[in-house]
Amino acid sequence: MSVRRAVEEIIPFIRHNENEQSNDKDGLSNNATSQIRNVAVIAHVDHGKSTLVNALCVAKKLCKGNELFMDSLDAEAERGITIKSSSISFVFDVPMPEQLRRNTIAASIQGSSPSTSSSDDDSKKMVKKQDTKEDEAKKSGSEKCDSQAKTMKKPQKKKKQKKSSRFDRNAPLQWHHTPRDTTMPTEKVLLNVIDSPGHVDFSSEVTAALRLADGALVVIDCAEGPRVQTRTVVRQALAERIRPVLFVNKLDKMFFLWPGDYEACYQRILRGIESLNAVIQQNDPKLMGPVTVHPQNATVAFGSGLHGWGFTLRHWAAIYHNRCGISERKMMKKLWGDNFWDPKTKLWSRAKTLQRQVRGFNHFVLRPLNNLFKACKDYEKHLERQDVVVSSSEEGKGGGGGDIGKWMRRLGVSPNSAGLKNKKGDRLVGSRLFGALMKGWMPAAEPMVKMIHQHVPSPLQAQKYRSEILYAGPQDDAASRAMRACDPEGPLMVYISKMLPAGGSSSSSSSSRFLAFGRVFSGTMKSGEQVRILGDDYYPGAKHGLFVKPVSSINHVMGPYVEAISGRVGPGAVV
């Protein structure tokens, strides 16, 4: 996909007030601002922020897997770190929230739109009144027949069959990645992702990124946990009233450091999540509801940004819940914490009383991943001994080739597929083969997009509690009210975060022309419109630091590229 085509997908979201008639066709709701998510990616240096953002770029086919799309400066490519914060936007299809999905299905059955809820409520009230009158008439008639009814034999009530929670060995396991159900209602979501530096010398770039975001994707190394800079930027994000979600990166490192010791891997991951939650609890502004992150709530994802794969516990719960005889939601809770599985009795317990009992996360998540990793390493040794060709027919033969063939059969992968070969056409082996198989099985973009969509607030929600720290004027004036309501009809309020060279973030900083990079919080903005610019030294009532200038053009930043857009831009847009 070209950059220009990606920008054309974004335009209906930021110009939603002009396209209300075409929202249904575009998969947008009546207020497209509710489908925007502004996220900053924050972490310590070298913990994998840019590689995770790059996984989203690969999912939208903006670049290939071995290219870092966001590294636009030569110094960034040379040093291998992010120096300047850069923004990029994506449009993804995601499943609707459960309540909105029910409303949509009910509306499609009744032949009306979900937005016409008030008229439906009135008709329901009328029906209820009629039903109560009929019930009263029935009750008066039924009282006369009570004496006759007592003499008759009461029919025996059928006992309700309890839903079985027994282990079903024959239940199928959906190992391979199944395509999305086309019958399930979906909606489009716009992700404005801002990749920020992790080095302490570039903290000002992190500040510029956080002011534009409503949520923060915190990235930690699974072995190192949250480092000093991670704690600093998380405190800063909470001070800006930004809701965090977590990605535990470099999970494949565990299989090198602690091969086969699943409990050591679990304890190291648990320690990192608990350390981050301790920082969150100490700095929680108590205005956003619960903000701590937990794997069983799908606010924590795991994976490898470098190899482009990731998952939440919901993915594994979908695989196992039928066989374990419990719901998917209960299975997610079983896969974390002190929940132990007995492989012999096939029962769960809250405490480990027998040696054979295994923690749910270790048995159902880490063990299959380690087995696949071991099969890939054994296949590499197998090829060193003799030159063989692996095929799915080798399943069950044992040995290195048989194990990897079994896994390929499970995942529905052909051994001759292009994704399992390098540029020269040779087969991938070892950790590279493991990364390629995992990328096809669990692409990192899917869990990240779902987690951000479900747990990061939209501008409509976030600006209600963020506007008072963003706007220094009176909190009861028209501008403040418009910002809290995210009102496109209110006064135009734009926060300018930083200045970019006119040629994009890849241009030299010595350029004579710069573009203002910021976010629209209320009102609508269009090219040629006169706006008041308040400088750093401006205060209410002062004449200095105040400028009136026209908006020369409106552009959208896509990593190293800047694309011009036309028309009005509404609240929630990062331009």
Image: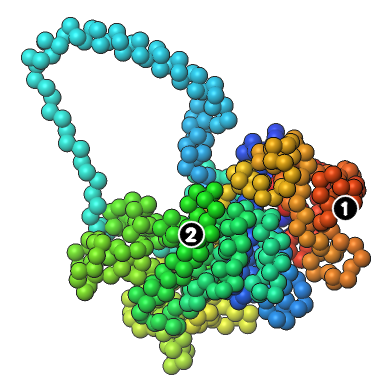
Q: Is residue 249 left or right of residue 563?
A: left
Which amino acid does the dot numbered 1 rest on?
Answer: Gly
Residue at numbered disc 1: 545
Q: Is residue 344 left or right of residue 229?
A: left
Q: Position of residue 364 (x, y in %)?
A: 35, 66
Residue depicted at 64% across the width and 72% down the height: 198
Quarter of image, res 264: bottom left
Q: Nearer the viewer, residue 155 or 375?
A: 155
Q: Nearer the viewer, residue 548 or 474?
A: 474
Residue at numbered disc 2: 281
Q: Nearer the viewer, residue 531 or 503?
A: 531
Which amino acid does the dot numbered 2 rest on?
Answer: Gln
Label 1 and label 2: CA atoms lie apart by 39 Å
Residue depicted at 11% across the width and 10% down the height: 148
N-terminal of the pair, mark 1 or mark 2, is 2
User: SS at mark 2?
Assistant: helix
Q: Is residue 14 left or right of residue 150?
A: right
